[in-house]
Image: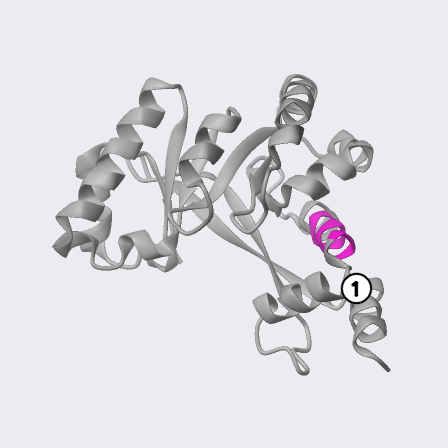
Amino acid sequence: MNMTRSIRSIIEHNLFDTIYESIINIQTREILGYESLTRLQEPQKYETISDFITACEEAGLRHEFELQTILNAIQRFPHKDARIFINISYDTFLDHYPYLQELLEASDRVTFEFLETSILLPERISELHQKLEPLRTRYDTFFAIDDFGSGYADVDRILSHSADFVKTDTELLQDLLESSGKQLILQNLHQYLEKNGQALIVEGVETKEQLDFLIALGIHYAQGYYFN
């Protein structure tokens, strides 16, 4: 079986597990929602899900993989009164918009996280704007920019569309307490988003010291192993 057929078989047989990581309001300790994360049931030759996603990209099957994981995330979600955060690429969102609308008919309170690895082409920015608001209005759908600080043209991504949330890359928290530069970036980003009616979600919280620093900055939302 060649690589493409093998990948397609994994997707068609839905050999994925779905786990959910909580996103916490660290000022009140209330749960904002849960991020859906996909794992391979049998890793086989792919050591990580990232390896499998790369293989999907090379085989031209990324859309099929993303749509299956989105369906899994919604159908398997056990917290019916909470908000679910689901990863998606810009082109998957735009090219499969009618299908996503069908899924949202059965599940409200979805937040789509636009992946750092996907690029929003300039010629599609207006198309994106046209498709965000109807979902916000009809289905209470929110939108997030994922992994700020790790990808291409991060500032442009924030300015190019009105995301409700911006999520930081986990590397931003590494050595945060020893890095005045990272602290300033985090503080300025938080203040900018607050002024624009958006919210920051800090990913990768692992220690109480990190959590206390974020609370002192006035940041509202975070996620990470510390809360597991």
Report the side of 162 relative to 59 (left or right).
left
Task: State whether residue 74 is above or below residue 176.
Answer: above
Can residue 163 be seen by looking at this rendering? Answer: no
What kind of secondary structure does the magenta stretch mostly adopt? helix
On the rendered image, what quadrant is the N terminus found in? bottom right
The amino acid type, in three-letter code, at marker 1 is Ile
Residue on which the image places disc 1: 11
Q: Residue at x 37, y 59 (%)?
A: 225
Q: Position of residue 214 (x, y in %)?
A: 23, 42
Q: Position of residue 169 (x, y in %)?
A: 39, 51
**Which quadrant holds residue 65?**
bottom right
Q: Position of residue 120 (x, y in %)?
A: 60, 38
Could you tell me which secondary element the residue under label 1 belongs to? helix
Q: Residue at x 63, y 48 (%)?
A: 78
Task: State whether residue 83 is above or below residue 226.
Answer: above
Report the side of 124 relative to 174 (left or right).
right
Report the side of 73 relative to 173 (left or right).
right
